[in-house]
Amino acid sequence: MVHITLPDGATRDFAGPVSGADLAGSIAPSLRKRAVAMVVDGRVADLSAGIARDASVEILTREDPRALELIRHSAAHVLAEAVQELFPGTQATIGPVIEHGFFYDFAAERPFTPEDLPRIEAKMREIIARNTPITREEWTRDQAHTFFAARRAGYKEALIDAIPEGQPIGIYRQGAWLDLCRGPHLASTGQIGGAFRLTRVAGAYWRGDAKNAMLSRIYGVAFATQADLDAHLKMLAEAEKRDHRRLGREMDFYHFQEEAPGAVFWPPKGWRLFQTLIGYMREKQARAGYEEVNTPDIMDRALWETSGHWQNYRQNMFLTKTEGEREFALKPMNCPGHMLLYRHENRSYRDLPMKIAEFGKVHRYEPSGALHGLMRVRSFTQDDAHIFCTVDQLTEECVKVNDLILSIYRDYGFEDIRIKLSTRPENRIGAEETWDRAEEALREALRVAGQPFTLFEGEGAFYGPKLEYVLRDAIGRDWQCGTLQVDFNLPERFGATYVAPSGEREVPVLLHRAMFGSLERFTGILIEHHAGHLPLWLAPVQAVVATITSEAEPWARAVLAALRAAGLRAEADLRNETIAYKVRGHSMAKVPVILAIGAQEAAEGTVSLRRLGERGSQAVPLAEAIRQLAAEAETPLEGEGKPAPAPVPETEPA
């Protein structure tokens, strides 16, 4: 007898094993028609799977959010079937679910191009319309090897070899086509629906290793409804307009060169913005009691062995060896250097909390295919800080850090902030009482701020729990930026101690804190969040004085001098071009304010003030223009309590 408990507490008893489909039918014939999968004791399973023991079971319909991953997974299989129908001889390798959709990597005679996508997508819709049942089979290892070897599917054979002995070899079949897969999947191809789109192609190394063959990857997105797909495609179109790689080029903020792959070259405008970020953070940290420090970029191997990076992170580090055979590494993180600074002197409990911060340049090797503008680079600046404190000080310091992080994000125009709390994992160090206090300290910080959070039980690091701060931008995308991490491990590894009131030496608790994270990445996020239209206080060029006629040059130069004297970052455009040409160029460069100067303005001592994104201009006396702009250009630190300008939609001037 198999005893099934349903979500509402009702039960069903069956004489023997029962499939999810038959269970759904016993509840209601209409549910059987709508069912796509089931959840057995908390795990999603195929609807066709047999339930052979007592269990709690929930039937999933296509409308359930948990079915979305199955829609995307089955869509990836349909993509592979479509490609192999259209391009015989193509090997399918792997096709996982990713955020918003799926991809599949293929070993093809030629790389796929964007022009191939409409044809492949049409074939996918044809396969979906067949509504072919999707069924699971379990093969022996020998049976699977024989099948795929006969079809010269070497990549599938490699995947079979990677499956641990004793684990089943899952095969999913839809009609005559089949694939190696763990599952689960929908019950039929028709349940995928039509709310999907193939979006792009790319190259990808087999298993992400540049030493392996280059494969051809096809990406797609899939949703439960057409409305969700349309909203996503609209967001993608808006994201393309906001792409920091395009805007950064148009605004002359940064570029890359082959001589230093993955490292940013900052021309004057971009460097001015970068230094504005640092200047703001430097002042904000100083007010919060942090001392700024600096540690070497390159340090001996022994340091990285002590920290554990050499054993666990070496493949991502840039290494070098001197003539004397001494090995060094460019620092991938700032923490070990800060440990040496702390340990350099004897510390007392009276010195704690000790807060040190560094705008440290770190270097991490990333595969060339993973590099992506400012978002993924090999050399970047972190706004790292470390707080050495006692266990008794832990809660207060966590509250202060959380308040500081949230205030900074608001200053930059981010109001929608999601926080994740990750708690103790199964494998961990430290006493349970200490973990209790650390987790409670992070919870208390969020309670004090009135900030909701999502709990991720068991996902903390082995050395301590953490908070992760996720910013939602103007078009609804999430960016993980700040972190607050409690660490019981690193001070002990480095022998860091302080003298307690008892006279005994004790190990401090370490808080790792980052707010921007990578300044390069945060710059990219800012550009996209504001669509390049940065708040006036952040804009590297806040105003351009543009002449309408050459006769107005003397007044234009006087206006420029007055703007600069008021502390505004201003430039002049005195070129022999039409004012329409100048306005168009500076609008493309997202200059917030253009002050047009003609003969009339020169005679009256006025300026024609035009703001980015607005139609028309306003004639105002120079003194009034300077008063307005100087007030708007105040940093949030100068005007505490003033709301940050909201991002504006990208609009071309008339």
Image (cartoon, helix red, strand yellow):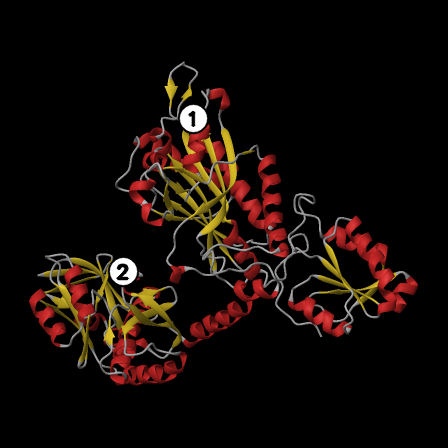
Residue 28, image x, y percentages: 23, 73
Q: Position of residue 81 (x, y in %)?
A: 25, 79
Asked if residue 15 shows in the view, the reply is no
Q: Describe residue 172's horizontal placement relative to residue 225 as left or right.
A: left
Q: Which residue is mark 1?
A: 343
Quadrant hosting residue 63:
bottom left
Tell me the quadrant of the picture where the C terminus can be found.
bottom right
x and y percent of residue 298 in the render?
43, 40
Circle 1: element type: helix
Q: Is residue 232 above or below residue 360?
A: below
Q: Which of 497/122 is in front?
A: 497
Report which residue position mark 2 lands on.
Answer: 8
Which residue occupies 52% across, 50% down? 519
Left or right: residue 72 versus residue 151 is right
Q: Hey, what amino acid is under mark 2?
A: Asp
Nearer-the-camera pick, 473 or 191: 473
Q: Is residue 19 above or below residue 624?
A: below
Q: Residue furthest top?
A: 503
Q: Residue at 38% across / 55% down in the picture? A: 366
Task: Identify the image quadrant of residue 208.
Answer: bottom left
Looking at the image, do the residues carrying marks 2 and 1 touch, with CB atoms under 8 Å apart? no
Tell me how many marks there are.
Answer: 2
User: Closer to the camera: disc 2 or disc 1?
Assistant: 1
- Nearer the observer, 216 or 180: 216
Amino acid on which the number 1 mark rests in the picture: Arg
Q: Residue at x 42, y 18 (%)?
A: 500
- Residue 98 is drawn in which quadrant? bottom left
Residue sitting at x 85%, y 56%: 558
Q: Work out whether residue 194 can be spotted.
A: yes
> Could you tell me residue 589's position as x and y percent?
65, 65
